[in-house]
Image: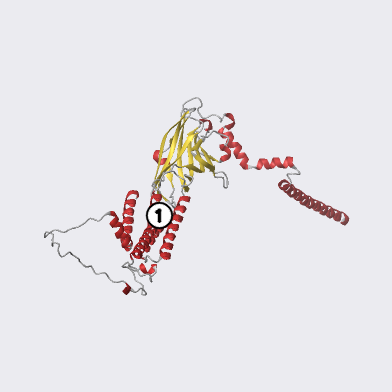
Amino acid sequence: MKVDLLTCLALALALAAASLVARATGGRRKHKEVFLGENSKFKFGGRIDYKLKRQDGTKTLLIKAEQLLRIEEHDFAMRPGFGGAAIPVGIDVQVESIDSISEVNMDFTMTLYLRHYWKDERLAFPSRTNRSRTFDSRLVKKIWVPDVFFVHSKRSFIHDTTMENIMLRVYPDGNILYSVRVTVTSLCSMDFSSFPLDTQNCSLELESYAYNENDLMLYWKNGNDSLRTDEIVLSQFFIEHFHASSGLAFYSSTGWYNRLFINFILQRHIFFFMLQTYFPTMLMVVLSWVSFWIDRRAVPARVSLGMTTVLTMSTIITGVSSSMPQVSYVKAVDIYLWTSFLFVFLSVIEYAAVNFCTTLEEMRKMKRGKIPSTFNASQAMAFDGCFHDNDVELTHFSRATPTLTSDPGAPDVRPPEGTRLRRQRSVRENVDLFVSNSYMIDSYSRLAFPLSYLLFNTIYWSLYS
């Protein structure tokens, strides 16, 4: 009896142990199978890849979207309503930024959101909630979209970080919104005749490349409100006005095309050029006038001052010209710079004239014997009414007193009362007067040069500002 009981207990323990081992083994196998399914698809590709494919929700949704829109049932190489009336495509633009404006290349770079609106009944789908479906660039490549391009563009690209910035929204009735974020560099024909006091008119033009007005009609979706801009701040320009317009473009081989224009007016900031060009130029011209107050015998001081101002003006002109396009007409800044350069150059010529007249006056006095041979040439220049050296002895020069000599037998003829006799000087006498009084050239220049330059600035700023 006891043996049978022990036998039954032993069998029960053996069955319990066997069941526990079976459960543990089954769990490990199941875990191993999942592990292999996640990491060993190259070894056990067939069955496990099929399971993963069934679990790929993204691909399943894409397949459902293609089936929902019936993409495989239509030929999207042709436009909607092919053979019928032109399909209307509305355009809506939001300007994000104007990245750069180059005067040398005559172009501008703009980043914008370009949105297209049209209706394609082939993409209509049933919906109880009447809600739209939104897709990215992967579906765009399988349907028809307008082939809008930028006229006169030099470079353009669609942003692709972190994916292509393309959005496609399809409504149940077939209406489509197609949005692209693009940066384009386009030509802007600029007129620099008033530079840097100029105003530039630039435009970005949109047009269909393949479809003329018989197949595709471009238009601004909301009129003037179709063009929106963010707050744009430029370093050298102030944007006066943004406005949209439209027109037609004719090509002799293909016909008429609808064209849309994004127009904007740029007013240049003058303060930068005042600091970099105009103020330094004015200071150089005023600095050249300092030589009029330096003694005319100080040749090194006046010549070095004149050469320094001339070379500085040449450097300013070269710097401005290097940052501008090589145009064939005269700009406003050229007029100001070259006129200022002329004033600086004339100040150097003025001293050359003063020095020449002084030397000529000295030579004449030497010939007439009015200057003793013991004096050198530099001492002879002291008699100009402006400056005298302490080492010059003025006692050697006897001051001539005018004496009136008359013939005793000659009658004393007096002019009538109330009349004055005046003999007009000839040109030669006037030249001799300036030669004998060369210091007068500096005296007149001190007044003539500032007044002339002030008159030039008044006329210049009244014309261009």
| Rendering coords of residue 330 (x, y %) | 40, 46
Is residue 109 or residue 428 the one in the foreground? 428
Crowding near pointer 1: few (<14 within 10 Å), some, many (20+)? Answer: many
Residue that protrudes farthest toward the left in the picture? 417
The image shows residue 388, relative to residue 237, as above or below, that is below
Asked whether residue 196 appears in the rendered view, the answer is no
Q: Is residue 257 toward the left or the right of residue 74 in the image?
A: left
Residue 201's x, y, as percent? 41, 43
Check disc 1 and give the amino acid type. Phe
Dot 1 lies on which element? helix
Can you identify the residue that label 1 sits on? Answer: 341
Whether residue 299 appears in this view of the structure is yes
The image quarter in which residue 47 lies: top right
Compared to 142, does 345 lie above or below?
below
**Quadrant of image for the N terminus:** bottom right
User: Which residue occupies 43% across, 65% down?
Assistant: 300
User: Residue at coordinates 71% horizontally, 41% vertically from top-left?
Assistant: 49
State the residue in front, 83 or 27. 83
Camera-side residue: 100 or 11? 100
